[in-house]
Amino acid sequence: MQRYVMAIDQGTTSTRCIVFDFRGRLNAVVQREHRHHFPRPGWVEHDAEAIWRDVQRIVPETLNQAGIAVDQVSALGIANQRETTVLWDRHTGATVGRAIGWEDTRTQALVDELAAVPGAEQVNTRCGLPISSYFSAPKIRWMLDHVPGLRERAETGDILFGTMDSWLVWQLTGGPDGGVHVTDVSNASRTLLMDLRTLSWDDELLSFFDVPKAMLPQIRSSTGDYGRTTTAVPGIPITAVLGDQHAALFGQTCFAAGEAKCTYGTGSFLLLNTGAEPVRSTHGLLTTVGFQIGDEPAVYALEGSIAVTGSLVQWLRDQLGIIGSAPEIETLARTVSDNGGCYIVPAFSGLLAPHWRGEARGVIAGLTSYINRGHLARAVLEATAWQTKDVVEAMNADSGLELNMLRVDGGMTANHLLMQFLADVLDVPVVRPMVSETVSLGAAYAAGLAAGVWPDLHGLRANWHRAGQWLPNMAAEHRQAEYENWQRAVELTFGWIKS
Amino acid sequence: MPGAVQSIERAAAILRLLAHGSGPLGVGEIAGSLGLAKGTAHGILRTLQGVGFVEQDKTTGKYQLGSALLHLGTSYLDVNELRSRASNWADSLASRCNEAVWIGAPLQGQVLVVHHVFRPDDTAQALEIGSLLPPHATALGKVLLAYDAGLLSAVVRTGSLEPFTWRTITDPKTLKRAVSTVREIGWAGETEERELGRASIAAPIRGSGGLVVGAIGVAGARERICDAKGRHDAAMVDHVLRAARAISRDLGG
């Protein structure tokens, strides 16, 4: 009987269920988009109950599409959007309002207040993250502060907290009727509440953010026995849980220190495996758990998040109307041979890694009457490559490891011009793997590894194949001159919003 | 001679009306000007909108000529769009056949390589995106010749079909016969016609209305692509046809 591994990818815009065969080939995929709620400026909410209903629908549909029976599924892995915060009632499964999304900035005032508390710098030392509205702790605190009576119920453990992984595992394993309340180290490392070294909830951090321990899930290794599904399609062992970018790192088989991947979507996330030791960043990167396999020591990673990459192309399409579809940007960019001296820095809502300048706003620098639409298109694509270079330079400086190849995935990897330019400016080969669904693949790999579908990491590496590779082909002096121009353009964005 | 198709005549009249340049028109104005029922005019407008010949203003609901009309003379489907839309299917074809996958589109009498996926064996390979292939000596090219009469006559008109190997088709009549076979069976094969020891298989990618916008195929060592008798591997042909159909379906073809 042919065996399969299933992955659920609960993402920011949609939830997908994918079935892979034992060679890691995609067999069936079903996806459902969910609604985002924007009740006020800066607020972003998800309906966690609706997402759970989506999961209950797509899992059987995927089995149906693959034409396989439940008992052919050896394992289920879950990958999820990180940091998004769900609170629910342990006894009924009813959520406390809607989940607060990772990009929600309602906690900015609270975050500013907390960052000013004496000793706040200890937070970063313990958990590897800056105090920011992106992460879960301020979101939990906000709900406890704003929903009457909630804190008391949280202290007694009647109200549970979870990121999307915890919520789905709890529901899949029975919900109010014996559901398992757990999370994995990669998701827990994005809460601001976990000690990076002990991989457990840190009492100092809990008291700093004033979050009761009773409401938190148990932290587990990324792979292991998470229980069996009792609803949707009962009987599948859940054997892996990973945050989505961590799953992509795993799916790209970046198992060794020094291996890195970048996922190019609306924003982009570059993760570098730094091995068994957490590397403290002094260049604006996040220190995070990469993944942990069974009882083995955790593997750490440095992460560089870039807010605007693919969304800059969408901006050119939707706001300026210069192109009709996203891929057309390459056609337009090829009408000219260079950027004509023009640089676009898309600091639409500030800049993330490695600058962390919330007050920055975007610029188009170097405009002359010579610049046409083609130059703008080129500057748009180049912005993605230069922003990646900024993060890679910071990573090399922090880790002492010299990146020698970048593994890429995501929609923008179909852009041949961009991928070549990326190799040119990074001066390392850029490699695209055969399966572009690396988030789901990573969750499936981790789950299959735990269930014995694949014997070891070596077996997984054997499944990874190059689908394309771009080699650097740019003179060093030219690269340096262009990079200096880019850096000057970045400086122009600083300090635009007056505090 | 069969009679004129009324709906096409009406569509042409709508385009002429919009081209007069008096600004965008509402469906009622268009129906009134041409003496059509509003429902009929609306149906034709929706179809023209679907192929990009007219555009509807989101706020006023009025119609004007679409940008696709301006590009009628150039490419029908942007090649980068084709790569982006075909990418997942191309990857899946490469892993199923364990061969390199190529997607081609016609460009000035030649085959432009729009997309290239490595053979998944991790040997050293270089991306050939952007290079040009000879239509008469490749499976991709034969597919494009089969469904593009303009390309066929351009290739034949040059007079000399370059011989790459002793098996290259150099006689225009033989080439015409070969491409008519492609039209009959729906796919093209090539064996050592471009390079000794190599073979390829390709099938058409169709856009909306069934227009062939490109070709997708696999290429590799002859002994892997063909059986002992020199016939193209039936399972591989099937995979190529399925991938071509899947992409065509996504493109609305």
Image (spheres, coloured by chain):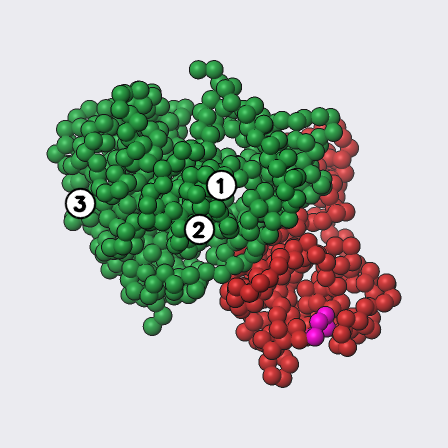
Chain colours: A green, B red
Residue A434's x, y, as percent? 50, 58
**Chain letter of the residue carrying label 2:** A
Q: Quadrant of the N terminus of chain B?
A: bottom right
Q: Nearer the viewer, mark 1 or mark 3?
A: 1
Front residue of A278 and A46: A278
Q: Evaluate whether residue B69 shows in this view.
A: no
Say whether residue B215 is magenta: no
Picture disc at residue A392: 1
Side (left or right) of A469 relative to A85: right
Q: Residue at x 55, y 49 (%)?
A: A428
Front residue of A334 and A328: A334
Picture disc at residue B56: none
Measured Cα–Cα span from mark 1 to mark 3: 45 Å
Question: How crowded is the residue under tag 2: few (<14 C-alpha within 10 Å), some, or many (20+)?
Answer: many
- Mark 1: which amino acid? Val
User: Which SS class for mark 1?
Assistant: helix
Picture disc at residue A176: 3
Q: Residue at x 65, y 45 (%)?
A: A474
- Mark 3: which amino acid? Pro
> Which comes before the other along the chain, label 1 or label 3?
3
Find disc 2 in the rendering and name its residue.
A259
